[in-house]
Structures are given as structure tokens and as C-alpha cells.
Image: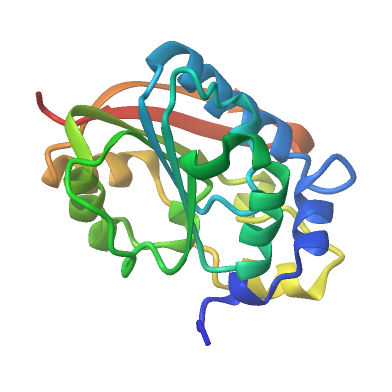
Amino acid sequence: MSSNPWSLVPAAEYESHMGPQGADQLAPLSAILGKALATLRPARLLVLGVATGNGLEHVNPAVTSRVVGVDVNLQYLGLCRQRQMRLGSRLELYCAEAEKVLLDAGAFDLCYAGLFFEHADPARLAGRIASWLVPGGALLTVLQLPGAGGAAAVPSRHASIQAVAERMHLVAPAALVKELGKAKLALRRAYELPVAHGRRFHVALFQKPK
């Protein structure tokens, strides 16, 4: 069994916390991916921490022929599959740690990591992500910036989410740029996005050399 606390968070509690009655972050995360899909039009998409598939509703099967999602929670992947039946065989889901999942080199045009690095080690993953991208491929990241008083997570009424929050670590945008730069993933553009509860996201696009 995975030691990752996310593997123990029920889907209902995850969506309750991340939805409109909680942190209210599902909608902006979905919109960020939707905008990237419309702009970059990737033929092959990789989503790290795909959870229940938030954002995949924006995938246009006529443009994106392969979607791979990775997550440690098998229940999330089951729901993702159920909700994205329209993608059929285009959708591949893997229950694994991103540090351990086996993916082909040069297999993706875009990798999306939304609120992912708060629960993973950029230093361990930068090289792996770079290897998965085609030359000229892109990595889209979303980081949670500190809240009032430097708080990392939005408080939750769910004990399972609280357990995850205790192991959550915010990643400074400059630190992520540094680690990804070591893997030759160069920052192309970045912006901050205000979200609910006075929080902000840092959204950044990195590119592998052509």
C-alpha cells in the first residue's frame, strides 16, 4: 500500500474540500488546463496528480489523441474513467507515484502539474518530466502561494485532508524554476491568479529545448 496520504483520502472528501463549499480550487485549476489545451493544442497530454479528472472535460479528442493521468489514489482514477468515457481508449490511467511510474521517453507534448509539487519533490522529478516531453514540449505548473500568515493549506473539516495538509510543503516559484532549469526546462511565461479565500496561484509554463 502506498505511504502517500493522498491514497487514503476518499474522493467525496477530496471533492468536498476542493469544491465550491471548501477551498473552491477545482474551477480555476480546470480553467487553467482548458486555456492551455486551447492555446497549445497538444496531441499527447500527461496529467500528474490527475485525481478525479478535473479539467479533462476540456480535452478535444479531435486534437488530443492520447491523455495519460497518474495518481496514487485508485478510487480517483475509477471516477475519472467513469466521467471521461467519451475519451475511450485515448485515456490511460496509472495508479502510481510520479517518481516511480514508467512512461516512455519523448511521449508527450504537454505535461500538466496543478497543485502537484506541494506533494512531490521537484528535484527528483524534474529530469523525469523533461525526459517524458518531446523536444519543444511544455510543462504547465500551478503552485499554491502562501495564504495569510504564511499558511500552506486552506483549512478543511475533513480529517483525511488535514493529514495531507500536515505533509504539504509550499514550493517557491523561484526554487521550482531553478530545479526545472537543471533539467533544461526553461521558463517561458508566468502569472499569478487570485482564487478563493484570499489565496493566489502561481501559474508557469516551461519548455524543453527543440
Please report the residue visible at 83 percent of the width from the left and 68 percent of the height from the top: 158
Q: Is residue 144 above or below residue 186?
A: below
Q: Residue 88's spot in the image, x, y percent?
A: 57, 41
Q: Residue 169's spot in the image, x, y percent?
A: 49, 61
Please report the residue visible at 42 percent of the width from the left and 51 percent of the height from the top: 171
Q: Residue 122's spot in the image, x, y percent?
A: 31, 55
Residue that protrudes farthest toward the right in the picture: 21
Does residue 156 show up?
yes
User: Which of the pair 91/106 is nearer the observer?
Assistant: 91
Q: Is residue 137 left or right of residue 38?
A: left
Residue 51, quarter of picture: bottom right
Please identify the quadrant where the C terminus is shown. top left
Q: Is residue 13 left or right of residue 103?
A: right
Q: Is residue 113 above or below residue 202?
A: below
Q: Residue 106's spot in the image, x, y percent?
A: 18, 41
Residue that protrudes farthest toward the bottom in the picture: 1
Please report the residue visible at 63 percent of the width from the left and 24 percent of the height from the top: 31
User: Which of the pair 65/193 is nearer the observer?
Assistant: 65
User: Which of the pair 85/6 is nearer the observer?
Assistant: 85
Does residue 170 show up?
no
Q: How many marks?
A: 0
| Colour convention of the picture | rainbow
Q: Is residue 114 above or below residue 149?
A: above
Residue that protrudes farthest toward the front in the picture: 89
Please report the residue visible at 81 percent of the width from the left and 44 percent of the height from the top: 19
